[in-house]
Amino acid sequence: MIMRWFPGGDDSVTLKQIKQVPGVSGVATCLPDVPVGEVWPLDRLIALKEEINNAGLEVEVIESVNIHEEIKKGLPTRDRYIENYIKTMANLAAIGVKCLCYNFMPVIDWARSDLATPLPDGSTVLSYRHEQVLKMNPAKIADVMLSQARGYSLPGWEPERLAAMAADIEFYQSMTPEDYWKNIKYFLAAVVPYAEKYGIKMAIHPDDPPWPLYGLPKLITNAEGIRTFLSLYDSVYNGLTLCTGSLGANPDNNLPALIREFTAQGRVHFAHIRNVKHHSSRDFDECAHLSSCGNLDMYAIVKAFYDNGFDGYIRPDHGRMIWEEKARPGYGLYDRALGVTYLLGLWEAISKMKTEQPEENGVSSPQ
Ligand code: DNO
């Protein structure tokens, strides 16, 4: 069990606080200030590892090394960025990283219409209203998201990405899904052999939200898309970040079935586990992790991971903002810590039911 953490003073949550959340052994982290496409310097990674290890935590997971738009667009200039990506992977391997979370979403990483929607209990959450998002142009969404970020960097909404947003969206209008798959395949063919060499499990994050937006190709949105993706390069090192909140935003996705299928294949290396509350098939609020707070059955979800031998990393995903906390939206300490405890509680109960049932039956027999 790990938690996401941003270095360099770009997080309200400290490593010391994370260390005190029972059951958490490490963090998923990144170097948010290195421009997308540049090599992550080894000396900075060594210092980052030292800082995290000194706090008694591990750093085996990176979230994310983002992919330069020219790779996603399939431009001839992509090879330079792919080379840099591989150099970054070598540096990550040098500090012992074992799992690399990334995404292949065109232009926009995750999108929400509001980052502080109040719930009846007075907490606030990230939310998505499809009609509102369609009415806003992407620059407006960027304004909304950045103005609500409380001064923290927003992963996936880096300034250099925003500057080119309108032109990039225009570029993709004529790109077919087939072309986009080809661009993904080209990237995997170049990078996965190095992932194998360096012992780093690649873990793609699904598209969020998992449906088409602004005419952009959205391919990693359901079981079928994931099957196609995995078939592009058949290696255990070409795997998934299975984000229940992203895939679960679409009520058509059967999360436990999807988790069973890909976990049993050994292709899930990182699990982002959170609940969502549907308001329609295209409108949702993020909510507390408990099954009773949203539409996903968290017991069935954790059980699907457990039953299929999941041995990767888990992190709670976005939490609500509670108890007057002022933090990066989705990434406060309190609600994510509650999420950790809940998920570990489910895991313990499920594992004990499996391993202790026969014995317990004997012991508790009235005869
Ligand atoms: C949002 C995150 C995403 C995720 C990336 C992975 O909070 O879930 O930004 O980290 O898509 O590359």
Image: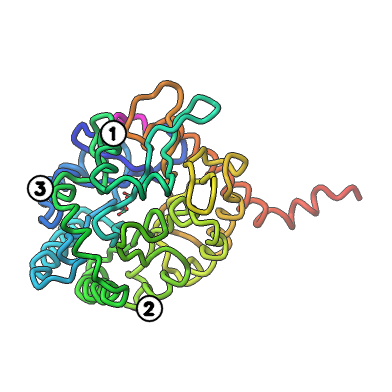
> Which comes before the other along the chain, label 3 or label 1?
3
Q: How is the image coloured?
A: rainbow
- Which-is-in-front pick, marks 3 and 1? 1
* Magenta stretch contains residue 16: yes
C-alpha separation, residue under disc 3 versus residue under disc 1? 29 Å
Callout 3 amino acid: Asp
Is 261 situated left or right of 102 in this image? Answer: right
Q: Residue 63: give its label.
A: none
- Residue with the mark numbered 2: 231
Measured as percent of width and height from the top left, residue 272 is found at 43, 51
- Residue with the mark numbered 1: 149
Q: Which residues are magenta?
A: 11-18
The yes-or-no answer for disc 1 within 8 Å of ligand 1 is: no
* Above or below, comparing residue 7 to residue 357 in the picture: above
Q: Residue furthest top?
A: 324
C-alpha separation, residue under disc 1 versus residue under disc 2? 37 Å
| Residue 215 in which image quadrant | bottom left
- Residue with the mark numbered 3: 43
Measured as percent of width and height from the top left, residue 220 is found at 38, 65
Residue located at (38% from left, 59% from top): 206
